[in-house]
Image (cartoon, rainbow, N blue to C red):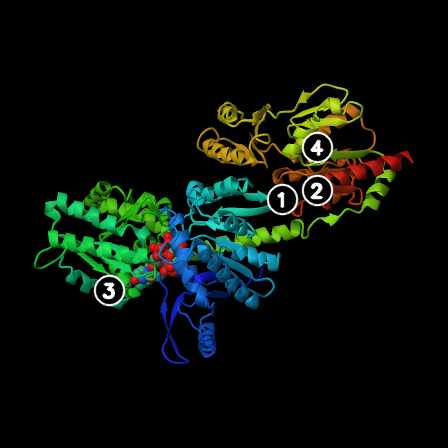
Amino acid sequence: MARPRLLVVSMSLPVTAKRTGEESWSFTMSPGGLVSALLGLKEFETKWIGWPGVDVHDAIGKKTLSITLAEKGCIPVFLEEVCDQYYNGYCNNILWPIFHYLGTPPEYRNDATITYQSQYDAYKKANQIFFDVVKEHYEEGDVVWCHDYHVMLLPQYLKEYNSKMKVGWFLHTPFPSSEMYKTLPSRSDLLRSVLTADLVGFHTYDFARHFLNACMCILGVEATSEGVVDQGKVTRVAVFPIGIEPERFINTSELSEVVQYMKKFKNDFGGRKLILGVDRLDTIKGIPQKYQAFEKFLEENEDWRGKVMLLQIAVPTRNGIGEYQKIKDQCHYHVGRINGRFGSISAVPIIHLDCSIDFNQLCALYAITDVLLVTSLRDGMNLVSSEFIACQKEDKGVLILSEFAGAGQSLGAGALLVNPWNIKEVSTAIGEALNMSHEEKERKHKINFQYVKTHSTQQWADDFMNKLIEITTNAELRTGKAPLELPEHDVIQQYSKSNNRLLILGFYGTLTQPMKNQERRGDGMNLDLHPQNFGEYNMWLAAENGMFLRHTSGEWVTRIPEHMNLEWIDGVKHVFKYFTERTPGSYLETSETSLVWNYEYADAEFGRAQARDMLQHLWAGPISNASVDVVRGEQSVEVHAVGVTKGSAMERILGEIVHNKSMTAPIDYVLCIGCFLGKDEDVYTFFEPELTKKTKSPSSSGSDSPKKVSATIVDLKGENYFSIAIGQTHTKARYFLDSSDDVVQLIHKLCTHKNA
Ligand SMILES: O=P(O)(O)OC[C@H]1O[C@H](O[C@H]2O[C@H](CO)[C@@H](O)[C@H](O)[C@H]2O)[C@H](O)[C@@H](O)[C@@H]1O
Ligand SMILES: O=c1ccn([C@@H]2O[C@H](COP(=O)(O)OP(=O)(O)O)[C@@H](O)[C@H]2O)c(=O)[nH]1
């Protein structure tokens, strides 16, 4: 299959432009791992849309820059006056610290024009500008891949413009715990927008889990292992750890120019062991902590003084932000102090460079490094670690890696993992690395080299794109369209023509109004699915997702599958009871396979807050390893065994009904109406295989026979099957009805027609 064209959208283009004349431009590579990684995307026809790193206000400038960038496959986004409050403000002074657990910054107090709101407005405006550029260049079939926290509103703008666009969003930073994320004032808008994408990707499982948790706690939507389900729409959430382009580093480190650099540097360093740090000069990289740990090491290991040095490449970044200027001063302070303390006339222990370096020199440094020291306080991935591994030569170095970098999960096995806040621990790790045996270094390197070689950036992009294409293609095949208006005439016609009819009706929201507090409190009606409410009808009642079944004239029978693990129930009940006692008006509904905590009669705001806390307790405790689904209802939290869906119960229910009814003719009419959660929508597709096959005799149950229902039981073709969702725009049902009133009217018409 031909690969679609890829529109990559990120804040920064891979090159930063500098004006050299009225119509001329020069370029340097933009800093950071995102750019390094995406430059490795070779197998897609790609256009890259982003900010060129410079403000351009005149028409000639914009035109000439656009033409020059087009030769590099890049399309500029001119952010002009919003740039400062957008990039330095909302993105890097609000989102970045929150996403990296550095806290929520207070509003600026010394400039009334820079407020939280003004920065968020700039963020919205900038995302709108990105959208305008994508819209201008989008061609049908393109995949739009949005990158990072700078463009969280873009998926929504794109989908509102064209719901068929294939849109992915990938976050390169950590996604913080929901406790941290929920401090962000615009938390809901950003989540809702991201959820409009078809696929949402993260570097690690932790980040994905935090995101799902935030969606559940803040938006109250259902989160499953597949992603987020909201009003029937599923947003897939998955993990794609990024890599590097290993060949680029391996090959470069073999160039003769690089070998020359290696010799030169070794000579310059005078035989001392080299500890290397390569980071953007960012608050998250823990550079002051690194210096303190090195100082501690020198303090406690007199023998090593003069025999080891730390070279820190501190790549300039985000100079317009006060915090970044402060961190520079802090680093300089530590370097001066430590060099003063442990330096000699011939050498100082730390070399700190406030600049980026040439790629060949970087590879040469990686190749001769004895210890790469990564002390990020938080880091999405940290590609420097992988680059170092790729460049290593015969005499292997050791990777000391912060456990708070995403890379810790991938490269931890071949590294010394440290907590960068624990100065003593990092200092000890430095000693361990410097004293490590050759064999141990080889062993560790081998593990990581294997990983780095096989998890390339190309692989990462392929995985993400393949998943995105698979999801969007399947979605097209599965429904291809929104549900249709119900052809009422056909429903009635087919009903009257048929001999053996099956009507499957949901209860809450289908036969009842969706209930709000006041309504239920007011009328005092008992709306439980209780046989006494249906006693006069000849029908079957299924409760608890089909786990219990009875005819109105009979007794309840249990249909719990054997081997269903229900060990989690006691622990969950304990947590539910705790919250019931502390939330006036809430109550607990228990059953054999599920537990529901309902706060519909509690104070709405407090109930929601309690539900959020309860979910945290559940995830951390009783359900952390259990096979359960957690369903967050509008005013309830439900926990039930995995796989307990209405569709999976259909087979059992049907078997029971058929058995009891001693059916002679196959079912030739099915009407299935409901207002179900996403996971229960399989009830609509349960009969679908029947529609595509011819009715077979009981003896011809060959391998192509649908597994679910015997051919003698059901005879459906398509025109006599109607699946109907109430009030859902994304659904597996074929048709929709607006409300339960419509359901009642429809049933009424079927009855009168029959009786006429
Ligand atoms: O463009 P800047 O503001 O100078 O920032 C540079 C990039 O920093 C961040 O990089 C992240 O992406 C890397 C690759 O996935 C990852 O390894 C690293 O841990 C992250 O910090 C930022 O997310 C990018 O958008 C910036 O371009
Ligand atoms: O002078 C330099 C030194 C390093 N890098 C690159 O910057 C990236 C840093 O990526 P990482 O994922 O480690 O962290 P980020 O800066 O994205 O937070 C790596 O690809 C480095 O090769 C750079 O552009 N210039």
Residue 566 position by quadrant: top right
Q: Is mark 2 within 8 Å of ligand 1?
A: no
Q: Is mark 3 within 8 Å of ligand 2?
A: no
Q: Quadrant of the C terminus?
A: top right
Q: Amino acid at mark 4?
A: Phe
The CA distance from mark 2 to mark 1 is: 10 Å
Residue neighbourhood size for the residue with mark 4, other residues' Cα within 10 Å, grouped as few (<14), some (14–19), many (≥20) = many
User: Could you say which is closer to the camera, residue 591 or residue 80?
Assistant: 80
Which residue in the protein does label 1 denote?
A: 232
The CA distance from mark 4 to mark 3 is: 75 Å
The CA distance from mark 4 to mark 2 is: 12 Å
Mark 1 and mark 3 residues within 8 Å of each other at the beta carbon: no
Q: Amino acid at mark 2?
A: Ala
Task: Tell me the SS state at disc 1.
Answer: loop
Ligand 1 in which quarter: bottom left
- For marks 4 and 3 on the same chain, the one whose residue lies earlier in the sequence: 3
- For marks 2 and 1 on the same chain, the one whose residue lies earlier in the sequence: 1
Q: Residue 19 at what x, y percent from top left?
A: 38, 75
- For marks 4 and 1 on the same chain, the one whose residue lies earlier in the sequence: 1
